[in-house]
Amino acid sequence: MSQDKILIVDDEEHICELIKFNLENNGYKTIISHNGVDAISKVEKDMPNLILLDLMLPGMDGYDVCKEIKRNPNLFSIPIIMITAKGEEFDKVLGLELGADDYVTKPFSVRELLARVKAVLRRTTVKEINKSYAFDNININFEKHEVLKNSEKIELTLKEFELLQILIKNKGRVMTRDFLLDKVWGYEYVGETRTVDVHIRHIRQKIEDDDKNPKYIETIRGIGYRFNSEN
């Protein structure tokens, strides 16, 4: 049985109880919160493996909760599935741009929700990366800041290396351009997200066999990038 801990954030008690009952029947541990401020507090305290986040919350809405979590370096890797009665495309895109991993619209079937929970947890489980990481013909030593392709050293700038490292450590997760800009260049950096695109292009030219048809660094149109590999 799974030991993953899931935080359910919804101001409707019957929705919370329904989700809680079904998650616990499937082996998950659950925590419940009914408002945004309390939700952030519980995320910091309990460090759940996944957050089910309703958008229409009293006081602090789900969008702001998501933004707070994703800008916190200790919390940003926790996956979020947004749940709302809204179904407009705008809401879905905005939620994903803020860093949510998936989106479920009320009313939803319990089977669908469970399937999405399992899929997101499977996709966003970050493997522990210590001193090195290898995939296909690429070997990376994080301690030495060294990248080898076919046993030959590839020269990456410091920013290119840091960008690649963040993408790899969040393999399978979509990283927004704004988030990457903040993490690599810092919150005080005054620039455009195009800076990220330029560096991604340079990294692709160095590690991809065909940078025009990248295999490892995938562009998520309108949002950002995702690193993919079999390892």
Image: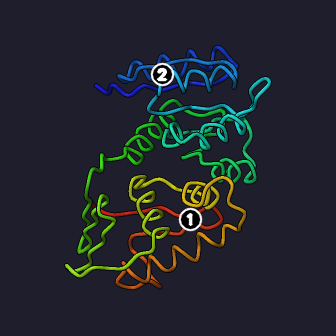
Quadrant in the rendering for residue 196: bottom right
Tell which residue pokes out farthest to the left in this image. 151
Relative placement, left or right, of 55 versus 131 is: right
Where disc 1 sits, the SS reads: strand
Q: Is residue 147 above or below residue 77?
A: below
* Residue drawn where x is 42% and y is 46% of the image: 124
As measured in the structure, the alpha-carbon distance from the residue carrying label 1 to the one carrying label 2 is 31 Å
Residue 220 is labelled as 1
Q: Amino acid at mark 1?
A: Ile
Q: Amino acid at mark 2?
A: Asp
Quadrant in the rendering for residue 13: top right
Residue closest to the eye, 128 or 174: 128
Residue closest to the eye, 132 or 13: 132
- Considering the image in quadrants, where does the N terminus appear? top left
* Residue drawn where x is 62% and y is 20% of the image: 15
Residue 46 is labelled as 2
Where disc 2 sits, the SS reads: helix
* Badge 2: residue crowd in 10 Å (few <14, some 14–19, many ≥20): few
Relative placement, left or right, of 22 versus 12 is: left
Relative placement, left or right, of 224 versus 91 is: left
Image coordinates for residue 136, horizontal then vertical, percent: 24, 71
Q: Is residue 80 above or below residue 184?
A: above
Residue 70 is labelled as none
